[in-house]
Image (spheres, rainbow, N blue to C red):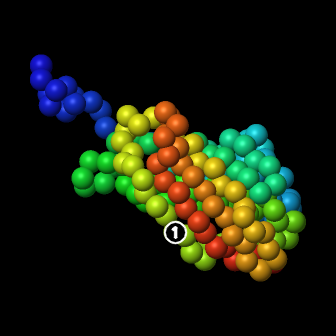
Amino acid sequence: MDNDAQTSDIERSRTVTWEDPLIGAALAKTMSGLEYIRALIDGTVPPPPIVNLMRMRPVAAEVGKVTFTCDPDESHYNPIGTVHGGLVCTLLDSVLGCAVQTTLPHGQAYTSLEIKVNYLRPVMADTGQLTAVGIVTKPGSRAAFAEGTVHDSSGKLVATASSTLLVFPL
């Protein structure tokens, strides 16, 4: 059997499940940002639906720094046969925002104002697990700034980003 016949025999489907996203959103209002991200990591707060959809998860958090992993697969491919840059951008936007969130007290929230991504190498289904780290470069009460990186399973730098985030009261 040739390679084309073998790959066409692979079942290509995925089921995505999630919990009510408003449960986590309501809990976020009762905790500091760091407490909330750590509760996502330990499973006491259900993850937002995008986490399961994009196959990413938060794995570490401290004040001003968050790490996520992501397992790209063929379902993330774009028309040219590589993982869509939007997956990498979403992963970076997530770690940058969550890094800022770890600096916020109870009653404060954030949203992305802008993000600048530099793609340095393609990601394929067989690239392996991606690791993204977001670090706050300047916290703030109105705006915060963060930078992030994504590395592949062999430690190669895949992408970098910087972001400005709006901080506001809930």
Q: Residue at x 39, y 49 (%)?
A: 121
Quadrant in the picture for residue 79: bottom left
Query: Image check: 69 left or right of 76?
Result: right
Residue of label 1 = 116
Q: Position of residue 129 (x, y in %)?
A: 50, 37
> What is the count of numbered marks?
1
Q: Is residue 121 above or below residue 146?
A: above
Quadrant in the picture for residue 4: top left
Q: Quadrant of the N terminus?
A: top left
Q: Quadrant of the C terminus?
A: bottom right
Query: Image check: 116 left or right of 36?
Result: left
Query: Image check: 29 left or right of 100?
Result: right
The front one of 63 and 119 is 119
Q: Is residue 16 above or below residue 169?
A: above
Residue found at the very far top of the displayed protein: 1
Tell me if I can see residue 93 in this picture.
Answer: yes
Q: Position of residue 30 (x, y in %)?
A: 86, 62
Q: Amino acid at mark 1?
A: Lys
Counting other residues with Cα less than 10 Å from the Cα at mark 1, is it few (<14), some (14-19), or many (20 or more)? some
The front one of 8 and 120 is 120
Tell me if I can see residue 36 in this picture.
Answer: no
Query: SS of the residue at dot 1?
Result: strand
